[in-house]
């Protein structure tokens, strides 16, 4: 796994990491000169396959079982589909719209029908403060389904890990800001306090 992880890190650095002259506002509302484009990084089939295999290894290492995999569109789409293909007939994929369709069935969740008894793996490409994956969590829980784990390709900070720890849900990322050699976004790692 270490060699595949190292290769994936180089893929993200080469195809998805951009150092900008001026800071840009990220989806989280935070600013950064480092922009991580997970979709661009994984636009090649070989790179997407590598990322899906790395996410799958994380999940298998956590020893969780799930019936459906997905998250908020567009960060989760490629992983929802890719992991479902890797896992076969027993695993369904889903994506969560940012808002209901507004016509037809007016669904928020597309693909697998989630509900009580459904165990869900949440996925996302790049997490900064975790707002999108938290939004996906809330939408899944609203269906009655259970989130058994959240997994991301890149975590740019420390916030999402804390949020899911507080929820009692395992959380893991294949790569972090440390692996990419960029500054964390949002509140950084907890600092040790003197005397206690």
Image: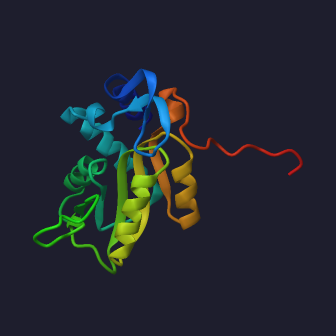
The quadrant of the picture occupied by the N terminus is top left
Residue 87 lies in quadrant: bottom left
For the point 30% across and 78% down, the residue is 115
Please say which color scheme the image uses: rainbow
Give residue 103's position: percent from left, percent from top.
12, 68
For the point 54% across and 66% down, the residue is 167
Instruction: For residue 48, say whether it is visible.
Output: yes
Classify 111 as above or below 125: below
Instruction: For residue 90, say whether it is visible.
Output: no
The residue at the far top in this view is: 21
Q: Is residue 166 left or right of residue 145?
A: right
Give residue 128's position: percent from left, percent from top.
47, 44
Classify 12 as above or below 148: above
For the point 36% across and 43% down, the residue is 54
Give residue 156's position: percent from left, percent from top.
49, 39
The residue at the far bottom in this view is: 116
Q: Is residue 83 left or right of residue 166?
A: left
Residue 150 lies in quadrant: bottom left
Q: Is residue 191 left or right of residue 7?
A: right
Give residue 130's position: percent from left, percent from top.
46, 51
Residue 110 lies in quadrant: bottom left
For the point 24% across and 67% down, the residue is 108
Classify 150 as above or below 125: below
């Amino acid at each position: 796994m270490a060699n595949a992880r190292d290769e994936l890190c180089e893929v993200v650095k080469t195809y998805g990491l951009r150092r900008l002259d001026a800071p840009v506002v990220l989806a989280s509302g935070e600013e950064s000169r480092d922009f991580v484009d997970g979709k661009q990084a994984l636009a090649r089939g070989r790179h997407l396959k590598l990322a899906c295999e790395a996410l799958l290894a994380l999940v298998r290492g956590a020893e969780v079982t799930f019936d459906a995999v997905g998250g908020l569109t567009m960060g989760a789409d490629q992983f929802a589909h890719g992991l479902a293909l890797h896992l076969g007939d027993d695993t369904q994929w889903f994506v969560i719209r940012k808002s209901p369709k507004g016509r037809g069935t007016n669904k928020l969740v597309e693909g697998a029908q989630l509900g009580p008894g459904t165990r869900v793996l949440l996925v996302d490409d790049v997490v900064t403060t975790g707002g999108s994956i938290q939004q996906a969590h809330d939408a899944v829980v609203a269906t009655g389904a259970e989130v058994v784990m959240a997994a991301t390709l890149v975590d740019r900070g420390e916030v999402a890990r804390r949020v899911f720890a507080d929820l009692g849900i395992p959380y893991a990322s294949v790569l972090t800001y440390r692996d990419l050699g960029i500054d964390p976004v949002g509140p950084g790692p907890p600092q040790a306090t003197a005397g206690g």
